[in-house]
Amino acid sequence: EAVARPVGICSMMKLPVQASAAGLDAAFVGVPLDTGTSNRPGARFGPRQIRAESSLLRRFNGSTGAAPFDSLHVADIGDVNVNPYNLPESCRLIRGSYQHIVGSGCVPLTLGGDHTITYPILQAMAERHGPVGLVHVDAHTDTADRALGERIYHGTPFRRCVEEGLLDCGRVIQIGIRGSSYDPDPYKYCREQGFRVVPAEECWMRSLAPLMAEVRQQMRDRPVYISFDIDGLDPAYAPGTGTPEVAGLTPAQALEIIRGCRGLNIVGCDLVEVAPMYDVSGNTALLGANLLFEMLCVLPGVKTM
Amino acid sequence: EAVARPVGICSMMKLPVQASAAGLDAAFVGVPLDTGTSNRPGARFGPRQIRAESSLLRRFNGSTGAAPFDSLHVADIGDVNVNPYNLPESCRLIRGSYQHIVGSGCVPLTLGGDHTITYPILQAMAERHGPVGLVHVDAHTDTADRALGERIYHGTPFRRCVEEGLLDCGRVIQIGIRGSSYDPDPYKYCREQGFRVVPAEECWMRSLAPLMAEVRQQMRDRPVYISFDIDGLDPAYAPGTGTPEVAGLTPAQALEIIRGCRGLNIVGCDLVEVAPMYDVSGNTALLGANLLFEMLCVLPGVKTM
Amino acid sequence: EAVARPVGICSMMKLPVQASAAGLDAAFVGVPLDTGTSNRPGARFGPRQIRAESSLLRRFNGSTGAAPFDSLHVADIGDVNVNPYNLPESCRLIRGSYQHIVGSGCVPLTLGGDHTITYPILQAMAERHGPVGLVHVDAHTDTADRALGERIYHGTPFRRCVEEGLLDCGRVIQIGIRGSSYDPDPYKYCREQGFRVVPAEECWMRSLAPLMAEVRQQMRDRPVYISFDIDGLDPAYAPGTGTPEVAGLTPAQALEIIRGCRGLNIVGCDLVEVAPMYDVSGNTALLGANLLFEMLCVLPGVKTM
Amino acid sequence: EAVARPVGICSMMKLPVQASAAGLDAAFVGVPLDTGTSNRPGARFGPRQIRAESSLLRRFNGSTGAAPFDSLHVADIGDVNVNPYNLPESCRLIRGSYQHIVGSGCVPLTLGGDHTITYPILQAMAERHGPVGLVHVDAHTDTADRALGERIYHGTPFRRCVEEGLLDCGRVIQIGIRGSSYDPDPYKYCREQGFRVVPAEECWMRSLAPLMAEVRQQMRDRPVYISFDIDGLDPAYAPGTGTPEVAGLTPAQALEIIRGCRGLNIVGCDLVEVAPMYDVSGNTALLGANLLFEMLCVLPGVKTM
Amino acid sequence: EAVARPVGICSMMKLPVQASAAGLDAAFVGVPLDTGTSNRPGARFGPRQIRAESSLLRRFNGSTGAAPFDSLHVADIGDVNVNPYNLPESCRLIRGSYQHIVGSGCVPLTLGGDHTITYPILQAMAERHGPVGLVHVDAHTDTADRALGERIYHGTPFRRCVEEGLLDCGRVIQIGIRGSSYDPDPYKYCREQGFRVVPAEECWMRSLAPLMAEVRQQMRDRPVYISFDIDGLDPAYAPGTGTPEVAGLTPAQALEIIRGCRGLNIVGCDLVEVAPMYDVSGNTALLGANLLFEMLCVLPGVKTM
Amino acid sequence: EAVARPVGICSMMKLPVQASAAGLDAAFVGVPLDTGTSNRPGARFGPRQIRAESSLLRRFNGSTGAAPFDSLHVADIGDVNVNPYNLPESCRLIRGSYQHIVGSGCVPLTLGGDHTITYPILQAMAERHGPVGLVHVDAHTDTADRALGERIYHGTPFRRCVEEGLLDCGRVIQIGIRGSSYDPDPYKYCREQGFRVVPAEECWMRSLAPLMAEVRQQMRDRPVYISFDIDGLDPAYAPGTGTPEVAGLTPAQALEIIRGCRGLNIVGCDLVEVAPMYDVSGNTALLGANLLFEMLCVLPGVKTM
Ligand SMILES: [Mn+2]
Ligand SMILES: [Mn+2]
Ligand SMILES: [Mn+2]
Ligand SMILES: [Mn+2]
Ligand SMILES: [Mn+2]
Ligand SMILES: [Mn+2]
Ligand SMILES: [Mn+2]
Ligand SMILES: [Mn+2]
Ligand SMILES: [Mn+2]
Ligand SMILES: [Mn+2]
Ligand SMILES: [Mn+2]
Ligand SMILES: [Mn+2]
């Protein structure tokens, strides 16, 4: 490298920063919103910290041979604006920004932010691509109807998406789900929509490569969105998050999931719920940065050396 | 003491917890809201942490001789409900709760929460007492008009109060104000309303006892509310807060201010903006607990031994 | 939910707080003692922090379908008093308190506190139930004879219990044991009593479901006590503890152990050694809260939906 | 310097470690006990952390010109043994160890540990020197009679000393006292013994040099012991302590106090109540190390360059 | 403001980032080097964290009325490259970069990095301006000759500058000096060069406004450089630094010093030794950001509203 | 035990400290250098913290029955001196010190320090033993050629060793390698030298006992050095390190690797890259201490009870 690691303005992987997605194949973009959080806030600083820790990343994926920067035109396009005092307004702002990003033909790789943001992002995705398939890693299904009377917060995005026809429900998989619940049968709604739910219990001490073979079948060649809530992982690996649940996935399984998406028609990705203050080591953000890099490495068009 | 310090459910000062303010002279009450925060969130956990650290407090004020629990009937009435996803709705919930508290003749001592909450609290106070005087300690005047188009967040409560006639503007003092500003003349609005603004610079290395003599003159014998934003203090003493500003007040000055309010017709008090995760020692919350205890000690009717 | 998550006094799972166990089927109770700790103190704040983090828990066990609150009458009965300056006196205080709890027919779910407390708790259990079987998860056997000449500290509870005939030694299992030792054959005493010792090495990378089938055989239908030292888990999952040992159990295994106790005649449970200051994320306490909830879910009489 | 700062075994100021005080004029000695703590434990790690941070200290006092190591024979004699499970036994162990140290004519500079330890230390001091004068810096008078029925814990050492005639009560001064109290007149006992109590309020924003001139008069040329509880300082400077009280002394005042003791017949010193886990920066321990070095610099026989 | 505070790539005060100083009146520039640190490393992350926390700053100085962005063309020009494995080479890299910055007529405001960096910066300054006056705030004089045989590390920059004639020695002032020393007369070298040394003891509990009137006399109208080591402040205010010394300056005094430089012919400024990991609150970096903003506000040509 | 755990000067496992290796079979030795770190510094405090946390270790290995202190003469010989400002000079200092240690026939167990130090250590090892076999656990191969033009930093030690003929390349194994890379084929250099590289992916969810059987074949009965970079483990277990990589080994696997070395002709060992400030729990250092103890337990001549 020509410069020392701590040198330089904190963009994702030290990529050039540009104001718009025009001309890009893929773009990292931050959405620093956490007003949708039900428990510990702080994910508004997720994008900042993920960018900071991403300085440890290098340009090749030594494990898979992927060479994303030799394949695609990629930049960091900064953050979309949000309104932390007004969730519905934030959703409108996000939707508008992503309409521009997606409209230019660019694949967004989003640094969240709490999971609320996936709802307006998927509005923009579906406007362009029609209902999308979804690979959703999370401790929670995020399909609640409302909380405290509100329809928009980080527990509801995928129900809103279903209601608006943004998802191709037979091509939805939710992996890593677990934890206590408000209802004795917490997966009822998901099953009724046709989602496949893979509870964390089915993942324990097991390679997820076979599961991903099935997922590739399920997704076929139509548009797929990857939404990765860092709380899908066990809190040992990702303490810096707002609603941790015990006994989650491992980073190895996370890599199996993302690498298992290679070959799919991925049209967008996000990594949400990194709340840095709960992990003073910075390692949750570093993990988030790595997962975003791995998503970049499986985008259509990325060559393997 | 009959029980060891860590023993017992975390109420404020281990006071009995009761569901309503009925029959109380004064009550500690929490408002765990932080959606109005412009920078670092976390004040939603202020009430919880203040209560936890308050276990170190004992029942007498050895410095002033005040014996509040031998003078007044005091309890912890828990938290009022809020809606973290909807600031205007939270304000309505808070206003409603405080109408009940104040309606029963009880003086509320509030554990915040971000400073947004003082707006609906003062709505309830003024309904009962008419426009109130205000002793406001803060790094910020909190009289902005709006941010991101929103009229309600922690930068605007006192402008909203002025607009609604909740404040007796000639009896408002703001102490500890400082920091960079959006405007070259940041106190213009306050001056125009007739507020007295005492910038932190005028407090540096100086006893505030003389100032408080003037404040007692200013407040006369009419109703006064004390609103204490912990960021009025220097971040060395109160690192656990969301919008810290350098070169602030000292705890000694904070005690001079609160003890200097003795004799005033205090009808309510709050201590806001404790965001515990930014102070892992717990000492910001401990300071908040002490300041709330000191406020209790200067309430009308508290005897001195 | 009707109230936001941070709202409310910190009882376990926001359960009602009541002063005694009378009329309860099961009760959460704290024992904030850590004077028995040999290394890092701090477990005196375990109950407080477990309660704080338990606000994330919901009322159903989505994984097992257990509905404990639809099956049993449960409350948080606060903390028993202890004397941190005097271990033998603390043991007398604890024993006395538990005699009352157990005497009312209530099953105690204890929030520790260091492991010393299990000795006086088992005194009270055995008074009512006779010698009990024990499912003991821990990195340590806690069967030392003495340290620094003292017979009571967190390394000796189960030897004291054996000496007093509180345990049905053929129905004792210790799972997760590991670490360096004062003796080249550290399990000799346990073997001699007839305990089954399952070192951590035998658990590595393996489901414990088969082991638990054997445990159910071993325990038969007679009274069983579950004593869960959080240090049985690997420090990655539970950094907030006083005597961590490397290469321990996983949360998934912890859930397999507890869920594997379903059907046993469980008469009491504890979760000990959470020392929050060594885990500023709060996640060790959250894990402790989850394990206590899982223990509640396998108590006799809990229905599954 | 010949070696880099992080190099070397952690003795106080990298002094040679020796097993006994024989032949030494002064010795640093640790007492890693914290069972006497009423609130947050952790002071057992005070000696370890003070030694670690003391590596930043250099051999001369540039401010006063004192050259202690050119004047006295000084070493680190390690820790005295304690029994964390048994406070009275710990006191016996400490007393015995200090009888040996003092018996050899060596002045002990103690790294605590909670304040309980000063009681047995003063037993040993008074055996040799008769009743001693006391310069006591603290937020608390530590003259309670008992807590939870116990006569020995960190709130009682100086009452025990009075009862046993270890103090020359007319030559006792307590500086920095403050905080809420169990009694409306918290200094009554001290006044009755003839102690001078200087509350923190009398120290605020003021040089303590004039006070120390009076103290030198008070102490005359007879034996004096300095007992410095780090909580005498404001928690901003010393967050790492177990029972912090707001609005305390500053480090400048602490230096004025210690430097103001120059010329007194100092026979021993301690620095107690550093609980490192509450200050992850290490700076409380560093402050403790500096205060111990300053005490060394005012010992009889220390030359000034 | 048009955007929420956490939104945007982390440049200093969200200023535009540009690659060179061409066309700028003043520029913020980072030097992320910490190999010169003698004690705790980490200042390499000072620039990153100062930028992150600077998002709290607003564009006007409400206290002084300064409007720097209405007066000067200012940007963030990123970091100069350094070689953390080779201090002399790093110095060459820094010198070269600053020759370009200074050569374009731009005033650099440096975000350090350890204090080593001021040596090559002053090489570049003096090339352009001749020997400069120096306002140096620090706990240390940084005029050692060498350590471990090395002539370049953070304890020597100003001796190197003297030797190379970069300083106008009669116009050098060092404020805040304190701490133990390697030599009984630690200011001898400085005095011999004609520096004015103001030890921290002379600053305690005192306004520094009178001192600054003298400094303005001393500096006259010739070029002055401000070098501000954050450890000049007390560690209570700035715990995040590598070689903290007790009993230092206050932020109010720091503001008095910087604001007292108004009117001087300032040609460059730096703020060094912020090591963020020792202050998890981020407040040391926030203080550093504020001090840099205050320096900007006193640059020649800045208008006051 | 005769003394309480926190009692005593912090040597490794409370072993006696001696100035030289003379007469010892094995010695713990610290190398507090971190100037070779490319990302987060802090490993200079690794030896100090590992020693501090090692107080939890007891003298027998209960899992393997190893009784090292009944078999070998072992001590802590303190730290070798280093020059943090000059990497090549540090390497010369380390090499010199290890020539003495190895020359006396003592097996060094090194507490790092960053991985740079293994290069001069292996120079000394090979001088005595000829080219050695290497069991290298790490996330990185550490075989880069240079960075920023420098040939010596923590990314290059094993390439330097190859170039100088210090390694018996057919007897080198690197386990746990992973992470993004500067090159699409990151193992090319290693393969060309004849190293066996076992990427982390091949270790996931799998016992490494079979691998170690092969390693014992590979190493034969000739001299072997174990170099264990703590970042070989997943950051969940070892957050306190400078260049963490996700999805690493588990502590169980680490124990399998080290215990699998039993019977080999081990001539030296190191445990490097513990940077304590990134793990405030102390558990990374505790893990490091355990791994060093386990290495001691497999040294030639250690008896099993
Ligand atoms: Mn989610
Ligand atoms: Mn989730
Ligand atoms: Mn405010
Ligand atoms: Mn404020
Ligand atoms: Mn145990
Ligand atoms: Mn245990
Ligand atoms: Mn005390
Ligand atoms: Mn005290
Ligand atoms: Mn400096
Ligand atoms: Mn300095
Ligand atoms: Mn390495
Ligand atoms: Mn490595």
Image (cartoon, coloured by chain):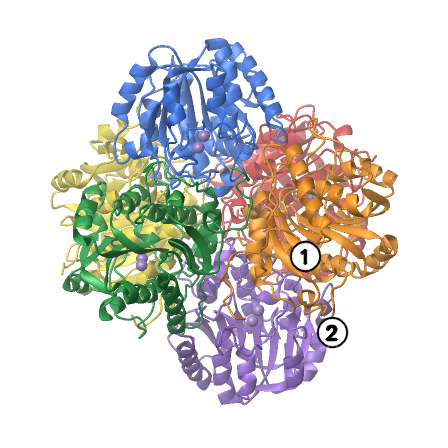
Chain colours: A orange, B blue, C red, D yellow, E green, F purple
Q: Where's residue C180, x and y in %?
A: 58, 63
The residue positioned 51% from the left and 82% from the top of the image is F122
Quadrant for the N terminus of chain C in the image: top right
Q: Are marks 1 and 2 in contact (CB under 8 Å)?
A: no
Q: Quadrant of residue E115?
A: bottom left
Return the chain for callout 2.
Answer: F
**Residue B76 appearing in the image:** no
The residue positioned 26% from the left and 48% from the top of the image is E261
Residue F11, placed above or below residue C207:
below
On the picture, is E112 further left or further right than D62?
Answer: right
Q: Residue furthest front?
A: E23
Q: In the structure shown, which secondary structural element does the residue marked by tag 1 occupy? A: loop
Q: Quadrant of residue B18?
A: top right
On the picture, is E223 further left or further right than A260?
Answer: left
On the picture, is B106 further left or further right than F206?
Answer: left
- Pick the residue in front: C250 or B117: B117
Please name the residue that numbered disc 1 is placed on. Answer: A23
On the picture, is A13 further left or further right than D269?
Answer: right
Q: Where's residue D117, x and y in %?
A: 34, 46
The residue positioned 27% from the left and 31% from the top of the image is D201
**Residue B300 appearing in the image:** yes
Quadrant for the C terminus of chain C in the image: top right
Nearest to the eye among marks 1 and 2: give it: 1
Please name the residue that numbered disc 2 is placed on. Answer: F210
Residue E262, placed above or below residue C77:
below
Q: Where's residue A134, x and y in %?
A: 79, 48
Q: Are marks 1 and 2 on the same chain?
A: no
